[in-house]
Amino acid sequence: MFRSVHRIDPRGHRRRITVGLIGIVAAAVLAGCSSRDGLGSFIVDPGHYSVYHCKDFAPKLTSLVAREQLLRSLMDRASEGSGGAVIGNLSYRAEYEDVLGEEKVLRRAAAEKNCDLASPAFQSDQSIR
């Protein structure tokens, strides 16, 4: 007499899909943060510094380190106020991660070419092949 009709609740189905997608995105973000090189090294092209000579690495590294320090100080200053940590991260974190990634790629490329970043005055202008 009574027929049981099972209806699919479209809101419940969408909610499960949304929660699943949020979980996947959160896992990807956390995996990127926990990787050894950080997320920034995935953004920088590894071949970007392949055409650099040893004398070109030191000035670029100096500018990257200066930019990293500036961004870090801006994030620290923003975190002093109420809610500033969130705003500082939203404003500066992406660029800070980019700079860190670029710095790691630059150091790796310099090491592959046997360039000494500490004393650029005594380096050869030739790259090792």
Image: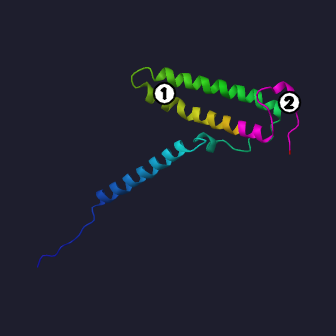
Earlier in the chain: of badge 2 and badge 1, it is 1
Comparing labels 2 and 1, the label whose residue is closer to the camera: 2
Q: Position of residue 71 (x, y in %)?
A: 57, 26
Which residue is depicted at the point 53% across and 43% down? Answer: 34
Of the 4 image quadrants, the one containing the C terminus is top right
Q: Position of residue 85 (x, y in %)?
A: 45, 27
Compared to 33, does 77 lie above or below?
A: above
Say which of 56 and 11 sits in front. Answer: 56
Say which of 99 and 34 sits in front. Answer: 34
State the extent of the magenta-drawn residues as a range.
Answer: 107-128
Residue 119 magenta: yes
Residue 75 magenta: no
Residue indicated by mark 2:
123
Helix, strand or loop at disc 2?
Answer: loop
Which residue is depicted at the point 25% across and 67% down? Answer: 7
Residue indicated by mark 1:
88
Q: Position of residue 103 (x, y in %)?
A: 67, 34
Is residue 116 found left or right of 104 in the rendered image? Answer: right
Mark 1 neighbour density, 10 Å: few (under 14) some (14–19) many (20 or more): many
